[in-house]
Image (cartoon, grey):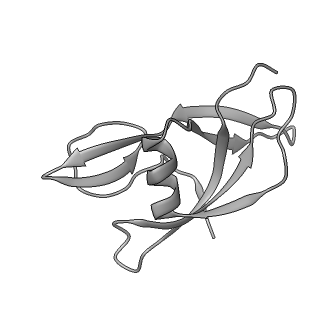
Amino acid sequence: MAKWADYGISAVRYNPEHTHIVRVRAYPDNGESLGSLVEFERTTVVSKIKAGTTFVTIVLGAEGNYRKGQPVYIIKVNGVEYIKTVDNGLPGDNLENLSEF
């Protein structure tokens, strides 16, 4: 497996309004395998992306292996930073349809 990013995000926890991610569950991408599960606060993810750390979404496939999803970006909408995979112009974090915890 080629390295996808520095981390693969597998699950998210949203705030009660479902507009912002509060925490993510992620695995370090070691190139040939994924490392041990870690959790990051939203602010940590934003800081890491701004510092050059890369993230992608990952989805567990039917065969029990993770598949690469989409790159994760910080996108500003009306001056507010959101964690997204696509710049859809809508306010709110959006990392596809990842599992919630």
| Residue farthest to the front, as pictured | 51
Q: Residue at x 28, y 53 (%)?
A: 81
Q: Residue at x 64, y 31 (%)?
A: 5
Residue 81 or 91: which is nearer the viewer? 81
Residue 52 or 80: which is nearer the viewer? 52
Residue 43 or 100: which is nearer the viewer? 43
In the figure, 88 relative to 80: above or below?
A: above
Q: Is residue 94 left or right of residue 63?
A: left
Q: Position of residue 93 (x, y in %)?
A: 37, 56
Query: In terms of image quadrants, where is residue 68?
Result: top right
Which quarter of the rendered picture does the C terminus lie within? bottom right
Q: Position of residue 79 (x, y in %)?
A: 15, 53
| Residue farthest to the left, as pictured | 78
In the figure, 48 relative to 92: above or below?
A: above
Q: Is residue 8 left or right of residue 97?
A: right
Q: Residue at x 57, y 53 (%)?
A: 98
Which quarter of the rendered picture does the N terminus lie within? top right
Q: Position of residue 37 (x, y in %)?
A: 79, 56
Q: Residue at x 84, y 45 (%)?
A: 35
